[in-house]
């Protein structure tokens, strides 16, 4: 009976020790579960932050793409404007050349007309001189006719 009591006491002591160990392990498990819950909450918060950054990044990429496309459009407009400017410059060069030709032609016509005018002025002077001679002759003939009429 003593041996059984002793074994029972040892069993009780062993059971008490196991219960203490169990309680300690259970407490450790609860601490780990608390830590796990805390880590889960932190992970959820971190995931939300990552999602927020993904949204911001996505918006920034949209903005970047929009700006990039606007720059491409601007570059196309600049290229088109440069082509238009070059075309207009060529047109101006051609018109300047045509204007120079026209000015040269008009200057030559003006010289020709000036020479023609000088010739006509000479002819006019000759005609005036002849007119004056004819007038003198007419006056002389008129006077002679008057004299003859009187005789």
Image (cartoon, rainbow, N blue to C red):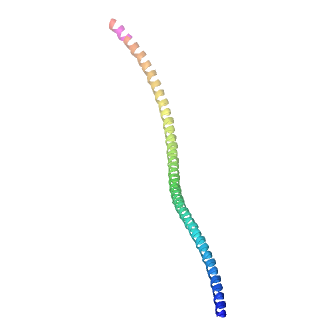
Q: Nearer the viewer, residue 96 or 119?
A: 96
Quadrant of the rendering where the N terminus is positioned: bottom right
**Residue in view at x 35 percent, y 9 percent:** 146
Check the image and report above or below for 18 versus 113.
Answer: below
- Residue sitting at the far front: 1
Instruction: Give the x, y percent position of residue 56.
Output: 54, 60
Instruction: Give the x, y percent position of residue 98.
Output: 49, 45
Q: Nearer the viewer, residue 41 or 50?
A: 41
- Residue sitting at the far left: 149
User: Is residue 151 shown to the viewer in this render?
Assistant: no
Tell me where the magenta segment starts and ends, as one range: 143-148
Tell me if residue 71 is in the magenta stretch: no
Q: Main secondary structure of the magenta part?
A: helix
**Residue in view at x 38 percent, y 14 percent:** 141
**Residue in view at x 51 percent, y 40 percent:** 103
**Residue in view at x 47 percent, y 24 percent:** 125
Tell me if residue 144 is in the magenta stretch: yes
Residue 148 sits in quarter: top left
Instruction: Give the x, y percent position of residue 74.
Output: 52, 54
Instruction: Give the x, y percent position of residue 63.
Output: 52, 57
Residue 15 sits in quarter: bottom right
User: Is residue 15 shown to the viewer in this render?
Assistant: yes
Q: Is residue 13 left or right of residue 81?
A: right
Total count of labels: 0
Quadrant of the rendering where the C terminus is positioned: top left
Q: Nearer the viewer, residue 139 or 57?
A: 57
């Amino acid at each position: 009976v003593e041996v059984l009591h002793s074994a029972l006491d040892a069993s009780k002591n062993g059971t008490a020790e196991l219960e203490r160990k169990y309680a300690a392990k259970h407490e450790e498990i609860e601490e780990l579960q608390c830590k796990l819950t805390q880590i889960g909450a932190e992970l959820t918060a971190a995931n939300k932050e990552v999602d927020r950054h993904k949204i911001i990044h996505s918006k920034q990429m949209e903005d970047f793409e929009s700006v990039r496309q606007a720059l491409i459009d601007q570059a196309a407009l600049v290229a088109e404007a440069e082509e238009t400017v070059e075309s207009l410059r060529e047109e101006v060069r051609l018109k300047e050349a045509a204007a120079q030709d026209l000015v040269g032609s008009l200057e030559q016509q003006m010289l020709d007309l000036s020479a023609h005018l000088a010739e006509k002025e000479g002819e006019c002077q000759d005609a005036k001189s002849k007119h004056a001679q004819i007038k003198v002759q007419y006056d002389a003939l008129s006077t002679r006719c008057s004299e003859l009429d009187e005789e």
